[in-house]
Image: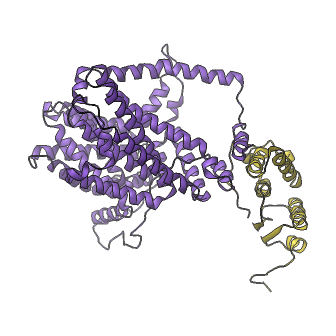
Chain colours: A yellow, B purple
Amino acid sequence: MIGLPPFAPDLTVKDHVALVAATWMADADEASVVSQNVMGALGLEELGTRYPHELSSAQTQLFGLGLALARPFDVLILDEPEQRLDSVWLAVVTDTLVKLRDDGATLVVASHSPALTERLADRTLELGAVV
Amino acid sequence: MNRSVAAQRVWRARSPRSVADRAYIVYAAVLVAFVLVSPVARAIWVGITTPSAVVVLTSPVLPTAVAYGVLVLWIVALAAGPMRGPALLPTFLSWSLGGSDVPRRRSHRGPLVLSFSALVALTALAAVLPAGSLLSHGLVTLRSAAMFVLAGAEAGAITFGLWLAAQVSPRGGSAGGAALVGLGIVGTVIPQVGGVLPWTWVASTYPSATAAPGSLIPVGLGMLMMVVVAIAMTGLERLGTDDLVAQATQWEMARTRAMTLDLDAASATYRVTPSIGRSVRAVPRTRSLLSVFVIRGLVGALRTPGRFIIGTATIVVAGFLMADALQPSGRGGILGAAAGLLLYLGLGPLTDGLRHAARVVSSSQFYGVSDEVLMALHAVMPLVVGAVASTVGAALLPGGPQPMAIAVAVLATVMSLGVRVGNALKGPLPSVLLTPAPTALGDPMPFVQLLWAMDSIVLALLVGLSVASVRLGTTSVVGVVTVVAAMTWFRWNRRP
């Protein structure tokens, strides 16, 4: 599960991401680019004008990931990012995370999804393996 | 562009207002200023400049009252900081800005400046009123009045510093609050010590025709203000994001509840959670149902010891005021009303069980006792503790314990407990009160809704006023008891 922040009920999805980007980026142009990239990578463009309470469970999960990606980070820690996602959305999230990894980001992911870990992980640690 | 400003710009743009919306806000503000603010301000000024008010303002005890007022204000600021401090943004902004590397003094500049300005303006205004009144009667010099207003503004700035310091360091705030209470007691017992404490500095500038305050006092207060504010602002950067988000969430919850006129739930948002005594057995091994409920109620109340002590101490003060209200001083009404309000507030921490019982009887019968008996059993502990505390307060009256004073204090306690029972059974705002009722004079329903929300406070004041006038006759007491009983009976019968 991605740690979801306290969404503002009267702020659109796009503005949530833009606000977080504006908090971290050096200027408004850079913040705008980051915001658009994040929305595009996660397929959130169509949801941009919606409010948090108008999102489905899977969309909320993606939205939370989008907010995490809108700010710079040294290490991204994700707890079961596949939760609440169907196979289509899981593929979107996996692609995004793989691209982050390929760009040099460090990810620590706890997951129950073999599909995700097989594509994403350089190293895996299996806890309490079930035979 | 400043990143904090950029983020806040996105935040402010979330619900853009049209020109018509803005024009309406200006129109409403002007209307409120003319219809409400202006007459109220004029009434206050006329009231405070009457000869009888001037007699009170020139009373020799007033500087002492000012000193205690400032002390209480500072203690309240220290107590409020850990729950709701001045550095507070909306929850999502607290999370995004609080979690960023933008310095807190920059990201929280808006609410900090607003809180500082509001406190300084309020305390300066509180000083302007008596100073202006005395000045208008030619009883004090302009310099003397200005010194008091300046000291008042500085006291407001110190209040801000203490409030912020307590938000930054809750433990420091608690220790500071305890230290102020202790110094207040020491200063009262040993007047020589009291004279050097900062709250008496403010009081010593109280305008007077006979003595001119030294100009060093505002300088001293100014230095204290700078030290307190500087310490608090330095600590601000250490304030954790989780703490900021927690305070913001709690504040938004309380505000939402208050806007639905559920004032009880709004205040419950800030009710402290049990801190000690979790391992102490709350339900004793006894067959006496009365003992079970009394002990359980006491143990429950003592698990939040600070709240219990403050509540009980408030009832002691209320008992004293109630007894004093009987004295032929001409202040019986004010003292009685204050006592009624304090009794109601003081009983709050003792009546958690009563509120719980009110919720339980609303659903189904538990514990094998009838609804009526359950409520009655939960009322015993607050009744006993409240009666004892108010008796102690009444007995503190100069001249020793007087049976009449004690009886009156206990009577007021019982009546206030009745108000508490009615309030516990209140439930949500009846939908019928939300229906507009247009009349030639406008829609009175917002006023009715406000009255519904504040009914317990109004009844508490009436309890105090009626009991204070008991020497003149018992009619008003009987009247208030009837209203309280009728309201409780009505709510009891309408419980789900």
Quarter of the N terminus of chain B within the rendering: top right
Residue at 45% x, 51% y: name it: B228
Residue sitting nearer the eye, B35 or A71: A71
Q: In this image, B260 relative to B393: left or right?
A: right
Residue at 20% x, 53% y: name it: B189
Picture coordinates of residue B373, whole percent (x, y): 32, 55
Q: Residue furthest bottom?
A: A131
Q: Is residue B418 above or below residue B446?
A: below
Residue sitting nearer the eye, B222 or B463: B222
Does the rendering let one see residue B428?
Answer: yes
Q: In this image, B272 relative to B107: left or right?
A: left
Q: In this image, B401 relative to B3: left or right?
A: left
Residue at 72% x, 38% y: name it: B14
Picture coordinates of residue B111, whole percent (x, y): 57, 42
Q: Is residue A119 above or below residue B178?
A: below
Q: Quadrant of residue B183?
A: bottom left
Q: In this image, B21 relative to B158: left or right?
A: right
Residue at 42% x, 55% y: name it: B356
